[in-house]
């Protein structure tokens, strides 16, 4: 699973969740976000996000 993390504040955009508070539907890929979309926590631009791989595995 991929998430995109804001390098300034640590907010993680999750494709599965989208950003419903800002009109972004679940399953919206990061590249499909409007060019003027900003981090909902700190206002950083899309350029300030880094793609990270997140494992679905749970360590017990």
Image (cartoon, rainbow, N blue to C red):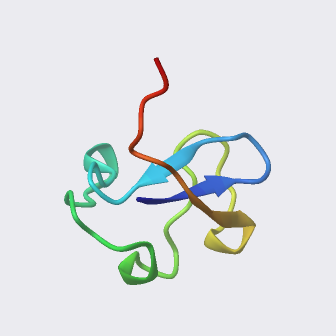
Q: Residue lying furthest right in this view? A: 8
Q: Residue at x 64, y 52 (%)?
A: 43
Residue 32, quarter of the rendered image: bottom left
Say left or right for 30 vs 27: right
Q: Residue lying furthest top in this view? A: 60
Spot occupied by residue 8 in the image (x, y as percentages of width and height): 79, 48
Q: Residue at x 21, y 57 (%)?
A: 26
Of 13 and 24, the residue lying toward us: 13
Q: Is residue 2 above or below residue 11?
A: below
State how many labels appear.
0
Q: Is residue 16 above or below residue 58?
A: below
Q: Residue at x 69, y 41 (%)?
A: 10
Spot occupied by residue 47 in the image (x, y as percentages of width and height): 70, 74
Say left or right for 39 vs 22: right
Q: Is residue 16 above or below residue 40?
A: below
Q: Is residue 14 above or below residue 57?
A: below
Quarter holding the N terminus is bottom left
Spot occupied by residue 16 in the image (x, y as percentages of width and height): 27, 54
Q: Residue lying furthest front in this view? A: 60
């Amino acid at each position: 699973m991929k998430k995109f993390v804001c390098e300034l504040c640590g907010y993680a955009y999750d494709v599965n969740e989208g950003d419903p508070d800002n009109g972004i539907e679940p399953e919206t890929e990061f590249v499909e976000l409007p060019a003027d979309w900003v981090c909902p926590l700190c206002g950083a631009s899309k350029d300030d996000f880094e793609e990270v791989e997140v494992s679905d595995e749970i360590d017990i």
